Image (cartoon, grey):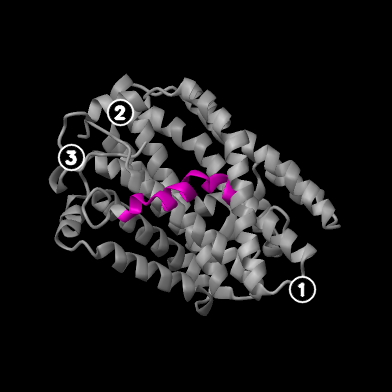
Amino acid sequence: MVSEFKRLPALDGVRGIAILLVLVGHSLSLRHDAESMLIGRLGVVVFFVLSGYLITSRLLMEEERQGAISIKKFYRRRALRIFPAFYVFWIVCIVAAMARHVSVPWGEALAPFFYMGDYYSALHASHVGQIMGVTWSLGVEEKFYLLWPAMFAFLHRNPVKLFRFALASIGAIWLYRIVMCLAFSLPIDYLRYAFESRFDNILYGCALALGLKLLKIEPLLAAVNRFNLMPFVAGAALIALAASEDRFSTSFIYIAGMALMSMLVATMLIQLVFLGSIRGWRWLDNRLFRFFGKISYSLYLYHIVVIASVQYFLPDLRARYSFPLMYAGSIALAWGSYVVIEKPFLRLKDRFAVVTAADESRSSAGRPQAHMAGVSNVAS
């Protein structure tokens, strides 16, 4: 069983790479390049798996140290982490739409306000043109934050049963997608965006964290130890699958493609968890990647607002200028949101942290780094 945890800087790098995939994918999709949009979707899947892994790892850490978890403190931490930046973004998004003389569809605007953007997108095929289209994934994650900690608290004294529950849930959701795809006539995007169809993406990360705790994935770690280039193999397979998604039927994507992509992301993530501290792989802790990882939440929120504004106010600007302007504007706005809004609330959020950074440093001080046979470091 895992008895020690510490922060894995490599995961900040993974988060940074994921948000860059989303940013570049969404900006290039303006050229009606379907493959670019699909690369952006890959970034969202990485966020989902990573979110499940990090949240479950934090809950495991809390249970390890306290013998139980505080659901109330968990919800307070999540609220302080998510709500302030989101609701400021919501207001900015409405104002920006009005400035572009876009008629605000208030049904679409109010759905994300109550974190129901996933179902709005699921029921409306015009997802790409929505003023708050990116909020669908936040709706999925928010429901995960409501349900998973409660289940964790119920089963935390039996991690084997919790691990099996996560795997069984993944299988059940996969089966649900197959049945709904083959037996029912649904809106074309329903299974792509609806919570009950995408929850398994996050559960792969949860199962990964639990598998690490229970040492259930040692064969995979042994393979990584023998072949350090495996993450590149998984990454190449992911990009190939994402880039070719439009060549497959919608049925194939729902029946097999979405599950396969999540499995590949989870496989690559555990490889990077192990390799992140090994010489030759420390580029994952690159300062630039960590910077993008730090502002990833605000960058995810604001990049579409900036892209749409550049497109509206400077329609004749050449691509060689418009794309750098989109990227620079998105990064600047995200950094401003992080500094002015996120950071103050993150400091307040730390008051409800059960395990502090100092605790983590003391717990890992003087201890050898984890090796293949017992990798026990879990990101916080």
Residue mark closest to the camera, 1 vs 2: 1
- What residue does disc 3 label? 369
Numbered tag placed on residue 223 in the rendering: none
Q: Residue 360 carries which label?
A: 2
Residue 354 in magenta stretch: no
At numbered mark 2, what does the secondary structure look like: helix, strand or loop?
A: helix
Q: Is the magenta stretch mostly helix, strand or loop?
A: helix
Corner quadrant of residue 215: top left
Q: In this view, does 143 lie to the left or right of 262?
A: right
- Height in image: 138 above or below 187? above
Marks 2 and 3 sit apart, C-alpha to C-alpha, by: 14 Å
Q: Picture quarter containing residue 162?
A: top left
Q: How crowded is mark 2: few (under 14 residues within 10 Å), some or many (20 or more)?
A: some
Distance CA(mark 3)–CA(mark 1): 55 Å
Callout 1 secondary element: loop
Side (left or right) of 326 relative to 177:
right
Q: In this view, does 296 lie to the left or right of 260?
A: right
Between disc 1 and disc 2, whose residue precedes?
A: 1
Q: Which residue carries the number 1 mark?
A: 316
- Residue 27 appears left or right of 166: right
Residue 171's x, y, as percent? Answer: 39, 54
**SS for callout 3:** loop
Amino acid type of the residue that numbered disc 3 sits on in the rendered structure? Gln
The three-letter amino acid code for the residue at tag 2 is Glu
Q: Give the range drawn in magenta.
A: 283-301
294 drawn magenta = yes
